[in-house]
Amino acid sequence: MTLPPELHAFRRTVLRQPAAPVAGSGIGERALQRLIDAQHEAMRAAGAAFLTAPQVGVCLRVAVVAAPDAPEPVVLVDPAAGDARELTADGPLAGRVQQALDQLAGVARAAGD
């Protein structure tokens, strides 16, 4: 077993860039599995409920989520958000995150402190 990778802090540049899709990135199956394994180890070490690839320094759309009823974490590769997003509280590693609230008549920003 190797040590989990360093987790990137809130203000790091890699967390402010849009993550690239895995499809078409050129990452091979073995490298993708190593990334997922590293995310899982880092998530467990941090006691987190989920971890994204940018949080371990890889700017790809991969997330590992510890689902309460699943024996193993759920892996999301190239997840896509729907049309509507609401204000949510992110996990303990990122703090509270303001997200846009998309409405049929246009886009309204979720206000908050």
Image (cartoon, grey):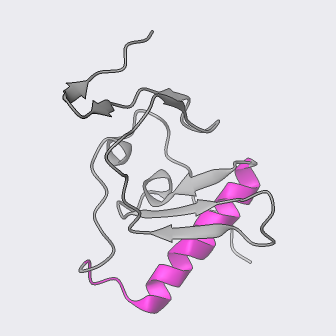
Query: Which residue lies most toward the top here?
Result: 113
Vertical side of 103 occupied by 7: above or below: below
Please give the name of the residue rendered at 44% of the width and 32% of the height, measured from the top-left corner: 86
In the rendered view, would you say 83 is above or below 63? above
User: Dividing the image into 4 quarters, which one contains the N terminus?
Assistant: bottom right
Magenta: main secondary structure: helix
Left or right: 57 as drawn, with respect to 69: left
In the displayed image of the protein, which residue is found farthest to the left?
106
**Whole-percent x, y for residue 62 in the image:** 46, 65
The reply, left or right, for residue 37 in relation to residue 15 is right
- Find residue 69 and report its horizontal and vertical position in percent: 81, 62
Quadrant the C terminus occupies: top left
In the image shown, does 102 or 73 lie closer to the viewer?
102
Instruction: Indicate whether residue 28 is drawn in magenta.
Output: yes
Quadrant of residue 37 within the rendered picture = bottom right
The image shows residue 97 at horizontal and vertical percentages of 46, 29
Residue 113, compared with residue 89, is above or below; it is above
The magenta stretch is 25-46
In this orientation, which residue lies closer to the viewer: 111 or 15? 111
Q: Which residue does the image show at 45% across and 84% down from the upper left?
A: 31
Q: Which residue corresponds to the image point at 43% horizontal and 11% vertical from the top-left?
A: 112
Count all numbered tags in the image, as a single digit: 0
Q: Is residue 112 magenta?
A: no
Q: Quadrant of residue 80?
A: bottom left
Residue pushed farthest front? Answer: 104
At a point 62% along the width and 53% down the height, the residue shown is 50
27 in relation to 55, above or below: below
Relative to residue 111, is residue 41 drawn left or right? right
